[in-house]
Image (cartoon, grey):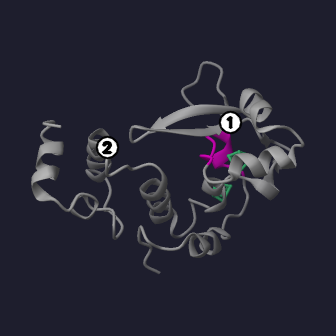
Amino acid sequence: MLISKKTPKETVLKIGKECRMCGNCCKYTSGFLVDDDIIRIARFLRTTTDELKEKYIEEHERFNTKILRPKLIQGTKPYGKCIFYNEQVGCTIHEVKPLHCRIGNCNTYGDDLNQWFMLNYLVNPDDPESIRQWRTFLTQNKPIPGGSLKELVPDETKLKKILNYEV
Ligand code: SF4
Ligand code: SF4
């Protein structure tokens, strides 16, 4: 199956159902919160979004875009387990876990699904720095359709300026 930037969220979620819920990814990081994730999780935990944010959520930055995620329990390590992960039961908010966790990014289409998420929620074509950071990502990864630099910034002159740090 070919996944592109424009693949509908519903399709991505169907593919993501391949997630075996083994919890391996939850031991090293947490999934980003988008759309109504915060509201759904707050309702599930019978708390307010403010309290949820204060107790369980932290800000992170990818591709020069600020995004929220469940706090990591890190200690002194550069990585850490998700605050919602429990060794015995797995994800304690499984029913309402964030979209990023629901797309099962380690399955057959994992890399493409991850790119789909980054392109739709993190890479900002209107932000030169975001595009430059995406360019760095593409030095190690082939873009899915809709994710090449030319597709993101079709104006050649503008793209050249961005990549030359002129804007
Ligand atoms: S996304 Fe993959 S690693 Fe993470 S819980 Fe699901 S099967 Fe395990
Ligand atoms: S919210 Fe759940 S699925 Fe997502 S990283 Fe945390 S424990 Fe894992």
Name the side, left or right, on which 36 lies relative to 158: right
Q: Which secondary structure, mark 1?
A: strand
Residue 27 marker? none
Q: Is residue 92 visible?
A: no
Q: Which secondary structure, mark 2?
A: loop
Q: Is mark 1 within 8 Å of ligand 2?
A: yes
**Which residue appears at 66% of the width and 70% of the height?**
18
Assess whether residue 165 is covered by the magenta stretch: no
Q: Is residue 56 visible?
A: yes
Q: Where does the image place residue 63, in percent across and percent down from the top left?
A: 39, 42
Residue lying at the far bottom in this picture: please name it: 1
Residue lying at the far right in this picture: please name it: 46
Which mark is in front, 1 or 2? 2
Q: Residues within 10 Å of mark 2 (few under 14, many from 20)?
A: some
**Residue that badge 1 annotates:** 81
Assess whether residue 26 is covered by the magenta stretch: yes
**Residue that badge 2 annotates:** 127
Q: Where does the image place residue 87, in percent across and percent down from the top left?
A: 81, 42
Q: What's drawn in magenta, residue-wise? A: 23-33
Most common SS among magenta residues: loop
Mark sitting earlier along the chain (1/2): 1
Q: Residues within 10 Å of mark 1 (few under 14, many from 20)?
A: many
Amino acid type shown at disc 1: Lys
Instruction: Check the picture and name the quadrant holding the C terminus.
Output: top left
Amino acid type shown at disc 2: Asp
Camera-side residue: 135 or 127? 127
